[in-house]
Image: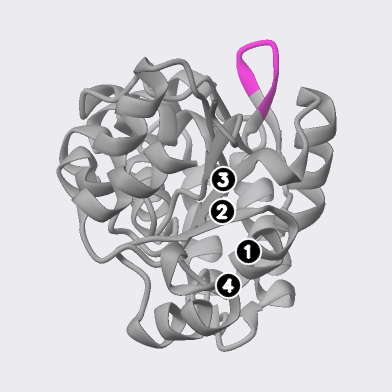
Amino acid sequence: MSKSEIIISDWNGTLIEDRDEALIFGFIGRGLVKDSLPFHPLRFLRLIKAKRQLEALPDGFELLADGYNIETLKQMHQICSRVLQGVEIDSITRRVNLYASDASKRLEERMLRPIQEMHRQGKQTGILSIGYRYGIGRILSVGGYGEVFDFIEANDLRTKGSKISSLSFRIDKARWLTELLSYLSVSPGKTIYIGDANPDEPCFEMVRYPVVSFLATEDFKQHCARKFGVQCVPESEADLRKYLHGI
């Protein structure tokens, strides 16, 4: 009898090589700048101003030693929300669809294939990420893994009619995971959580079965091996598959 009921995975640095959302947001931004002329000159000026403001911020989505630079992320969110407000949602989805073709080549299939096997055997699976929900789903779909996850919990664009009204902003993953497991009526003691960096550590502490991504730094792997046990740091796809089947 299986001891776990669900696999929940981080996205950036775990299921895809990208460590943050800078690439997808940059691609969307360049597309918006191109589309704004000649018919939306004011939007063009707002985008150029936002680009300069974002470039002036420290760290961006980069991870600090103790996790996210929360103040920087808040400022980024405010800048992006102002720029996106009133933009047609279709223009964003078109850009994401174009981006997904290249991004899907950076999927971490050593993690995805074992998760896919567990899903086919009936294990519930999901993603928990501070990234962009539609982008995650589209990249997985283009890469051939669109049916692997039962849900994607991530930030998203809110719309009013056909236009964007705001950008959701959640970064406290431990609290988010607590609420998610409560909603799903799943015990942390029956949960597998996969992550790659310091912001995932509170989630590791919550669940019974933490797993460290292949893409994590060696320092983080060693830290987790000492704290949670070497079994949570698989060295190969075969190791991960064996561990998941055993729990």
Q: What main secondary structure does the magenta stretch of the protein show?
A: strand
Q: Is residue 147 visible?
A: no
Q: Of the residues tagged 2 and 4, which is closer to the observer? A: 4
Of residues 230 and 221, which is closer to you in this image? 230
Disc 3 designates what residue?
A: 192
In the image, residue 219 lies at what x, y percent? 41, 88
- Label 2 is placed on what type of residue? Arg
- Residue 162 magenta-highlighted: yes
* Cβ atoms under marks 1 and 2 closer than 8 Å: no
Q: Earlier in the sequence, mark 3 or mark 4?
A: 3
Of residues 226 and 220, which is closer to you in this image? 226
Residue 244 disc label: none
Disc 4 designates what residue?
A: 228
Of residues 16 and 4, which is closer to you in this image? 4
- Residue 154 magenta-highlighted: no
Cα distance between the residues tagged 1 and 2: 14 Å
Residue bounds of the magenta highlight:
158-163
- Label 4 is placed on what type of residue? Phe
Disc 1 designates what residue?
A: 76
In the image, residue 20 lies at what x, y percent? 44, 61
The relative height of residue 167 versus residue 78 in the rendered view (above or below) is above
> For residue 90, which quarter of the picture?
top left
Question: Is 42 left, or right, of 30 in this rendering?
Answer: right
